Structures are given as structure tokens and as C-alpha cells.
């Protein structure tokens, strides 16, 4: 466990001795002990961590930061898409996969109501068929578009969630708060361009 924590220069600088709960500045009692600890290899806790928190609380805070970063990357991937459009992707993909496999649409029971709601002259055989009818293309063309568009999206999600999980697993395996707060979790994330 670290004995010292850096104090921000905006708060007067120096270090906090976590054992004695005193601030130490250069040329004050305790500074030589701090320098000796550094020479011996101690790494002080960085600014911005509440050193009074227990290990579980520190891990939870760092994993929350990792989750927030992953959410930001996900938002980058789906930029320009509406919440409704994103919510419908799972439905279109499920439907497209079953149609591509030669199976009946999982939405067969509601397709007549969808056809009526859209004013279609006949009931489509799938959700993608209904969308295709409105769009003016064939069901097969629309299924192909859904499958092609979802592959890069799913690959990005696999990379983001895999790295999020990898970093949180690493954090949760740590037993020293100093290791948790100095762990560089900003490596390995996918490059998403633009």
C-alpha cells in the first residue's frame, strides 16, 4: 500500500503522508523520508484519488471510468443514428438471419398487422420484406443490406466490449490500490476513425 499521495499544485502542492495524515512540502519535516521512499521504489498515489476509499471503492470508480470510455466509443460508432433506428437493428438482424437461413420470420404472427399498418396490398413474409416493400426493393436485397451493415457494427462492439471487459478484469484482479490507480486502461481500444 502506498504511504504517500501527491497533492495538486492548485491545492498548495506537496504530498500527503497517508499514515500520519499530514501534508509534507519540500524542506519540511518528513520530506527526507518521502524522498527516501521514492528512492526505494515507492510510487505515490496520483492526484485525484480519494486515498481514504477502500480497494473495492477504488476498483469500482476506475471500472466506472472504463465503462464511460467504452460508452463514448459506442456513441462514436452509432453517430447519426436515432435511438429508434438502433433499437430496430436487433429486430431487423434477427429477422434477416432467419430469412437468410430459410426459416420463417420470428415476426410471422404480427406481419398481417404490419402490412395493414403500412397499407401493403399483401402480407410480407418477414419484417425485412415489409421494409423492402416500402423501400421499393426485394426482401433478399434488404436482408443483404442488413447483414452487410451489421457486420462492421458488431465487430466494433466486440472490440469495444472485449477491451472494456479485459481492462475491468485486470482491475478486479489487483490487490493493491496503487496498482489500480496507476493501471493504464487507455491502451488497446479499437481505432474508429473520424
Image (cartoon, helix red, strand yellow):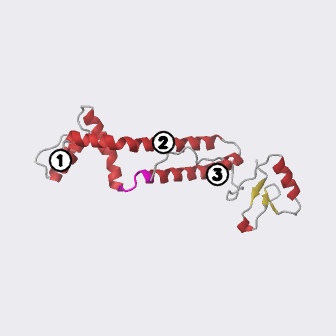
Earlier-in-chain disc, 2 versus 3:
3
Kindly indicate the quadrant of the structure image that contains residue 126: top left
Task: Residue 57: give its label.
Answer: 3
Q: Report crowding for label 1: few under 14, some 14 to 19, many 20 or more residues within 10 A (C-alpha).
A: some
Horizontally, is 132 left or right of 84 in the view? left
Q: Give the magenta-colored segment's residue range.
A: 76-82
Height in image: 120 above or below 29?
above
Task: Name the magenta segment's main secondary structure.
Answer: loop
* Mark 3 secondary-structure assignment: helix
Height in image: 11 above or below 19?
below
Earlier-in-chain disc, 3 versus 1:
3
Horizontally, is 78 left or right of 29 in the view? left
Height in image: 11 above or below 106?
below
Quickly name the residue at label 2. Answer: 159
Horizontally, is 172 left or right of 29 in the view? left
Quickly name the residue at label 1. Answer: 133
Q: Is residue 54 rendered magenta in the image?
A: no
Residue situated furthest front in the rendering:
194
Q: Report crowding for label 3: few under 14, some 14 to 19, many 20 or more residues within 10 A (C-alpha).
A: few
Amino acid at each position: 500500500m502506498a504511504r504517500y499521495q501527491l497533492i495538486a499544485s492548485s491545492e498548495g502542492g506537496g504530498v500527503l503522508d497517508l499514515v500520519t495524515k499530514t501534508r509534507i512540502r519540500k524542506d519540511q519535516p518528513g520530506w527526507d523520508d518521502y524522498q527516501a521512499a521514492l528512492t526505494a521504489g515507492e510510487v505515490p498515489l496520483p492526484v485525484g484519488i480519494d486515498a481514504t476509499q477502500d480497494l473495492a471503492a477504488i476498483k469500482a470508480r476506475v471500472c466506472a471510468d472504463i465503462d464511460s470510455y467504452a460508452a463514448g466509443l459506442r456513441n462514436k460508432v452509432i453517430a447519426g443514428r436515432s435511438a429508434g433506428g438502433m433499437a430496430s437493428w436487433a429486430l431487423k438482424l434477427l429477422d434477416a438471419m432467419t430469412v437468410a437461413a430459410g426459416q420463417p420470420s420470428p415476426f410471422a404472427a404480427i406481419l398481417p398487422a404490419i402490412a395493414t399498418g403500412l397499407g401493403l396490398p399483401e402480407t410480407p413474409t418477414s419484417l425485412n420484406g415489409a421494409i423492402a416493400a416500402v423501400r421499393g426493393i426485394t426482401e433478399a436485397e434488404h436482408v443483404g443490406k442488413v447483414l452487410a451493415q451489421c457486420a462492421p457494427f458488431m465487430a466494433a462492439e466486440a472490440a469495444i466490449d472485449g477491451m472494456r471487459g479485459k481492462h475491468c478484469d485486470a482491475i478486479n484482479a489487483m490487490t493493491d490500490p496503487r496498482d489500480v490507480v496507476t493501471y493504464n486502461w487507455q491502451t488497446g481500444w479499437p481505432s474508429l476513425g473520424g
